[in-house]
Image (cartoon, rainbow, N blue to C red):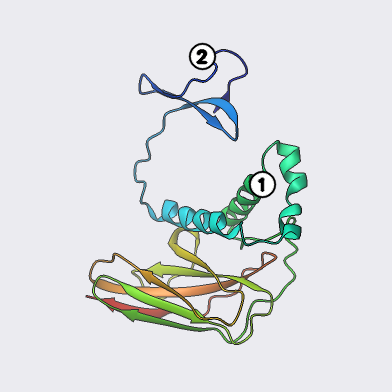
Amino acid sequence: MARATGPLFSFGASGKMGGAIVFTSWKGRPVVRRLVTPSNPKSAAQTGVRSMFGYLGQAWAPLTTANKATWNAQADSKAISPFNAYTGGNSNRWKSFKAPSKEFPAAEINSVGTGLTTNVVAGVGEVAIDAQLTGAVDNWTIMIFRSLTTAFATSKSNLVKVLTLDSTTLVAWTDSPLVPDTYYYNFRLGTDDGVLGPETGEQSAVVT
């Protein structure tokens, strides 16, 4: 990606040219980049990234003013917004298979919730999933992983959903649409300062 610092056909160019380059803006700056078409925009790896990135976008607003302020120095050093510093920093953590953190830097010293109960119930073209803690401790998230193979190892590429689980309130999500098959799920908790808990135990559901 090239940053445009002067006239390049126009000061506010946007769109594609010749099926090769794209003129756009990124974080308020005019940029030029090569046009890239993903070979499989629904690959497992991309689905996992989008699941985490989607969660991060939704989870910013509920953060406290103090949480958000910890990202200011990162934002200033890169000339971006605190929100972009938070999403970028936590996306980089996820690339290393680390849980997201509300604050920067991630201390990774807190404890995940206790007494987690999860249920998976299959239906027609879907699986209903719920989770609940008996003790929230310093918990922030629950990450849901899915595979078509039993005894699978959780990874970035099989993450399908991230939910906020920071209290003892029941949270629920429906995984759909799904084709008829047997699906295997596993779960991991994450603390508010970036600790990724262990796998909680595989469960299966037969979708019709």
Q: Which mark is residue 10?
A: 2
Classify 49 as above or below 131.
above
Occupied quadrant, residue 135: bottom right
Identify which amino acid the numbered label 1 is placed on.
Ala
Q: Residue at x 35, y 71 (%)?
A: 149
Q: Residue at x 27, y 77 (%)?
A: 123
Q: Residue at x 57, y 12 (%)?
A: 7
The front one of 176 and 92 is 176
Q: In this image, 159 relative to 205: left or right?
A: right
Task: Decide which of tag 1 and tag 2 comes sooner along the chain.
Answer: 2
Q: Mark 2 falls on what kind of element?
A: loop
Identify which amino acid the numbered label 2 is placed on.
Ser
Residue 41: percent from the left, percent from the top? 37, 46
Task: Locate the N terminus by quadrant.
Answer: top right
Residue 65: percent from the left, percent from the top? 73, 58
The residue carrying mark 1 is 85
The front one of 22 and 146 is 22
The front one of 65 and 194 is 65
Occupied quadrant, residue 197: bottom right
